[in-house]
Amino acid sequence: MKTHWTAETWPIAAAMIPFPATLADGRPVQEADPVDWAHALRKVARAGFDAVDPTDSWLRIADLDAARLSAFMDICRDLGLAVPAISTARRSVIDPEHGDEYLDYSHRVIDTAAGIGAGYVSFGFFGPLSAAQRSATWFWTADGVKNPADPAIYARAVTRIRELARHAEGCGVQVALEMYEDTYIGTAKDAVRFVTEVDHPSVRLNVDIGNLIRLYRPVERWEEMIALCAPFAGYWHIKNYYRMEDSASGRVSSHPAPLLGGTINWRAAIDAALELGFDSPFLVEHYGGDGLDICALNRDYIRSILSSRTERDDQGL
């Protein structure tokens, strides 16, 4: 395992998805006092994390002014939380209404990442939740926005990601593209095709196959997704699901699971990526229940995989 990190120091960040973007009194987290940010981040630190991804569904740090961004980073430092990466969600650069705005925002995310010393950013092409998704218990059980089958828009997506890649390269930042259903990187084959067409050394795949395993429809086997995508893996969002399939009726259901359970064998998946030289941070995610503490369990499980791998490499196995 050729890397500048050990199993103990490998960045494994907590996602902020367990925390809502609106406070109990109705104030947006974006406009809240830093003391409110500290309240959430303190919970992350108490769960044993030493790294956090702000996750812009919670707080858009790229849209904070200099004083508030400094206050955010001061809180993280005081709590012993590094910020190795910034993830974006539902701000697609090809959004039919806000694509230009989100492209500008993505450039700000790259600049912000470089400014705070975060070496990685994650972008995706998935759109806002539909009304059906917002009303569902699990949003992935309802249809959402689909990327259009329009060669011109596909070409625009490639061009805009390449533009962001050139910017990121100049800042020492790596771009990861998040796999997500019904987007141009919504299957393993499509994801590999897209990143190959972008053809830029600063662009990798965020192989978030949990987004696909959870779908109530036929999907590629997780082993096939990993085999195709691991060679392109960069900053990696990781979560697991129990996927239940009735072969007689074709009925599919799913439920969030800890990494150690669930359908995806994450030990095998991570080992496969490490064999190919994977050398980027991880982000642990979980929906439902006590998401933060399950993320902490997932973090410890990943460290056990990295530790086992280190021992094997040390022994020449």
Image (cartoon, rainbow, N blue to C red):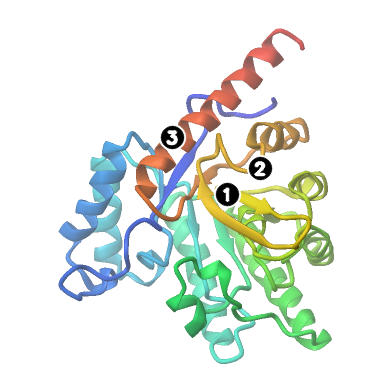
Q: Nearer the viewer, residue 198 or 181?
A: 181
Residue at horizontal 63%, vertical 57%?
176
Q: Closer to the N terminus: mark 1 or mark 3? A: 1
Q: Looking at numbered disc 3 in the image, what kind of residue is underneath it?
A: Leu
* SS for callout 3: helix
Residue nearer the viewer, 81 or 223? 223
Can you say which quadrant of the picture contains the N terminus?
top right
**Dots 2 and 1: beta carbons under 8 Å?**
yes
Which residue corresponds to mark 2? 264
Q: Neighbour class for label 1 at 10 Å: few (<14), some, many (≥20)?
A: many
Q: In which quarter of the image is residue 154?
A: bottom right
Q: Position of residue 5 (x, y in %)?
A: 56, 28
Q: Mark 3 points at which residue?
A: 297
Amino acid at pointer 1: Tyr
Compare marks 2 and 1 and give the one earlier in the sequence: 1
What number is the disc on residue 241? Answer: 1
Residue visible at 74% across and 34% down?
277
Q: Which residue is drawn at 32% across and 59% down?
A: 19
Counting the numbered discs, the total is 3
